[in-house]
Amino acid sequence: MNKLICTLLVLTCLIGCNSDDSANTAFIIPQPTNVELTSGTYLIKNDVKIVLESGDEQTLVIADQLSDFIKAQLAVNIYINEEPPGDDYSSIVLRKESSGNVTEPEAYTLAINNEEISITANENHGLFNGIQSLKQLIFTQQKDNEIPQLVVTDQPTFSYRGMMLDVSRHFFSVEEVKRFIDLMALYKLNKFHWHLTDDQGWRIEIKQYPLLTDIGSYRFESMLEKNYEPYIGDGIPHSGFYTQEQIKEVVAYAAERFVEVIPEIEMPGHAMAALAAYPELGCFDINYQVSTSWWESFGVMCPKESTFEIVEHILDEVIILFPSKYVHIGGDEVAINTWQQSNLAQQVIQEHNLKDEHALQGYFFDRVSQYLVTKGKQAIGWDEVLEKNIQSQPTVMIWRDLDLLAKAQEQNTSVILTPGLYTYFDYYQGNSETEPLAQCCFLPVEEVYKMPVDYSADYNVDILGGQGQLWSAFIKTESRLQYMALPRMPALAEVLWSTQSQKDFAHFKDKMKAHEVYLSNKEINYRVIQ
Ligand code: ACM
């Protein structure tokens, strides 16, 4: 169905079908732990006082964010810790205090009664989460400035609720990345995995190695659609990178929205752009070029001492930019057969008494992972590393087969669930004949919603949470990015936040319908939920 018609239908229903029942629904995504609706509604008046009880500077920042939202959404006057001119005003109280039932840093209580709106939490992150719920009640309101009276008590199931954005295949500007982080934050997603380097482009300024961006951030064209064999290029150059100042700006922006930014610097594979810039990182004396085709790559770093030196220097700069304890160092799809043909690589195998090239990959990963530990950081790797006899206990993203949880258990690594079957949002979400061009495979929103997250009966593994992936080979614009993320990203947010008993896809659909009106008003693209 055309998006405009659908939006009109929803709008008509929200206005025309305004029974007491619908007025008394909380369209909050992800579904909170507990929602107690009372019968009435609360009218937000023309003057609103935001009262900060016992906050700090960060509390003020989030109060400002709430103020900006309400002003834009309801066109009312906001006073933060200031008396409105008359007596007839609404109060929104932000209360940062310990209370019996709020013990988790992200937990909050949102109470709306006849008198006031209040959000109580132990930590600012909890207050921020409560504000996201309040914003959703406001933008899905049934009548002018009226929201349901209720008490929401809420906390997440998983602490890691992430989204990965690939900016190598297609570059997204700072402003586009910020808007993506805004969307994540609205759905209480708290980890932004920034896939900054790959075969098709190096996107982060490294001052000690300027060619990484001078050469590695540019490709002279991209494969036209899916013309692999024979290859056909589009003839359009593609480039872009973030300066270190811009990286800091994004990290700070995300932090104000309680989103932690985790950088990924891919190695030893998916490194064609790095090799094009610094061929000495490779094993062979050849002319490496930033890849223009998707996926196939022989761009593998050579596991020699001078490579580790460069990698460590690069990571030294990365670490300073990202306060997260995690640095993702890739490890997936390494064409280790290239090491079979390299005397240098074979020498390393012999010197370190390694069994084969798989063990050599494990050695590479452990070297870098252990270097990160000396800097107070924890490596993340894609799940291939579980098959490489690693010793360094990184955190692992399982993207292929969830049976790999058995290996994670054996190796005592913590896990983030990123299975292609449920979290690859670059896959088609509808009929490939009518949907815009996407990566292989079919992942409709209802399938995302079915992602299993409780493996406690079968494995003893520390599962931190999960993450959606937006690989961008076929995502060239912000509008397409939004389309691929919505509604699958909010569905995943609910999978990771809410407990099994709260999950109800039919209810999720109703809520998403109500959210579509807001998204349309904000000119955010989405796939209409059906
Ligand atoms: C991956 O999709 N290669 C992690």
Image (cartoon, helix red, strand yellow):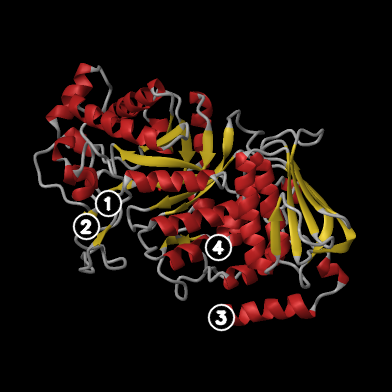
Chain-order first, disc 3 or disc 1: 3
Identify which residue, 191 or 127, lies in the foreground: 127
Whether residue 124 is visible, yes or no, is yes
Identify which amino acid the numbered label 3 is placed on. Answer: Asn
Is the CB atom of the residue marked by disc 4 within 8 angstroms of ligand 1's nearest atom? no
Distance, label 4 to label 2, CA atoms, is 29 Å
Residue 193 lies left or right of residue 169; in this view the side is: right
Distance, label 1 to label 4, CA atoms, is 26 Å
Distance, label 4 to label 3, CA atoms, is 16 Å
Say which residue label 1 marks: 201
Q: Are marks 4 and 3 in contact (CB under 8 Å)?
A: no
**Depicted 290 relative to depicted 6: above or below:** above
Residue 177 lies left or right of residue 237; in this view the side is: right
Disc on res. 219? 2
Distance, label 3 to label 2, CA atoms, is 36 Å
Identify which residue, 207 or 414, lies in the foreground: 207
